[in-house]
Image (cartoon, rainbow, N blue to C red):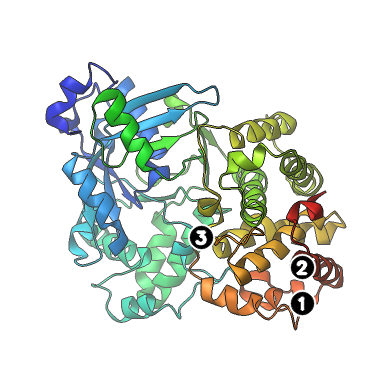
Amino acid sequence: MLNNNNLAAINKQLPTPTYKRDSLKVGIVHVGVGGFHRAHLAYYTHLLQEQEDASEWGICGIGLRKGDQKIHDVLIKQDGLYTLIVKHPDGKIDSQIIGSIIDFKLGHENADPVVNQMAHPDTKIVSLTITEGGYNFNPATGEFDFENPDVQHELQNPNSPKTIYGFLTAAIKIRREAGLPAFTVMSCDNIQHNGDVTRDMLLAFAKEQDKDLATYIEKEVRFPNSMVDRITPVTTPSDIDYLETTYDLKDEWPVTCEPFIQWVIEDDFSNGRPEFEKVGVQFVPDVKPYEKMKLRLLNAGHSVLGILGALHGHPTINACMEDDIFVTYLRAFMDQEATPILDKLEGIDLTAYKDSLQERFANPNIKDNVSRICSESSAKLPKFLIATIQDNLASGGSIDYATLVIAAWCYYSDKGIDKNGQKIEIIDAMQDQLHAAASNTKTDPLAFIRQESLFGNLINNERFTTTYSDLVQKIYTDSDIKKLMN
């Protein structure tokens, strides 16, 4: 069993932490302890702790939702330890035990432990991987959603937070009253301008809850923008079995990932930061061109493969990349629609970057399920793909490749089956709304794109509606999606 007591025995087969975990203090409070966090920020922190005395930067994981109970229970049982399994394209597998997470607290039933941890004098950074939906903004307008019942509750009951904003304001208020310096709020989510978005949403909320506190946040709290990247598929039973069979190691929730890792972040912190540059993190004055590159190429490229692959019946992203038609379509989208609307990038060879994306997507050992890539598309596509369509409409560029994906998304949301009649697993907070809109396509070909919260005013653009209408009707009448991709 993976825990502190067994590390010496485990070390005979796998690398384990060499630093003294019992001397670590919680300097980073991280909300949303999923696979990506454990393959990225927690991994970078572990690397730094391996290199030098970084004892002030231990991580306390935070779960704000009932669904976080399982990962909490596993990590508490395992003393915060977990195995990181890195799967290379050539079949090589590297595994090691990560020790940077030293505590985990839940806040969905009792907020006090989480608020108190954020407010603790040792806490210098509160970091987030809460997915796009957790930021509580309207994807079309970018405005804070005050209609959210949890937000309404928090405004009336500031000592009983439910969303990330209620927890942050509660903790910041305690720190301010105690004379403690503000912590940094550091988003690690795939949202363009993620730090700016976090700042804008928190300030919108705080101004309604406590105007004086909002003024303090505006002045004292820093929100660095960052670009994060590492493909981290959902852990499968076979990953757990692999560790038990190969190393006789029982880890109830290991993490698998690709070897590639990247983090570009603005050097703008309220109260100090780890020296992550020593382990390969790139600090820059402005991260926006880099994050746009990643969002419009990697994230949008993933969605192109995921949505079209789901309809065709490909189970994984690497299966899509074993299909020449999908490879050609992806590259055409990246070259003709995504690349032309990117900003100037210093020190980046875009051709080499796109080549690396294709290699990463094709990694046969990652086997990233298309269902994971397609999950919460309503939160992702407005930022990754619909924004690319809007930019190309403004510049006169191509929209054909991205628009086919939107048309496919409509069919996917309507029918819930692939072109072979097999059921598709759909995971989306807006699933019912998406289905209701898409199901009217037969009588109104533009029904799906009338959802203003997702598509903004695209319904008023004749070039887009003409292209979309043609493609969606072809998808509904042709059983072979690959014919439309040729």
SS at badge 3: loop
Give the residue at x 52% y 59%: 197
Q: Nearer the viewer, residue 52 or 79?
A: 79
Evaluate whether residue 273 shows in this view.
no
Amino acid type of the residue that numbered disc 1 sits on in the rendered structure: Pro
Q: Looking at the image, which is closer to me, 199 or 463?
A: 463
Residue bearing the label numbered 3: 425
Are the two marked residues, 1 and 2, in contact with CB atoms closer than 8 angstroms?
A: yes
Q: Residue at x 17, y 20 (%)?
A: 9
Quarter of the image where one finds residue 83: top left
Using the image, determine if residue 27 lies above or below residue 201.
Answer: above
Q: Amino acid at mark 2?
A: Val
Is 470 positioned to the left or the right of 227 in the image? right
Direction from residue 484 to residue 295 in the image, left or right: left
Q: Position of residue 406 (x, y in %)?
A: 70, 63
- Dot 2 falls on a residue whose secondary structure is helix
Residue 445's tag is 1
Q: Amino acid at mark 3?
A: Glu
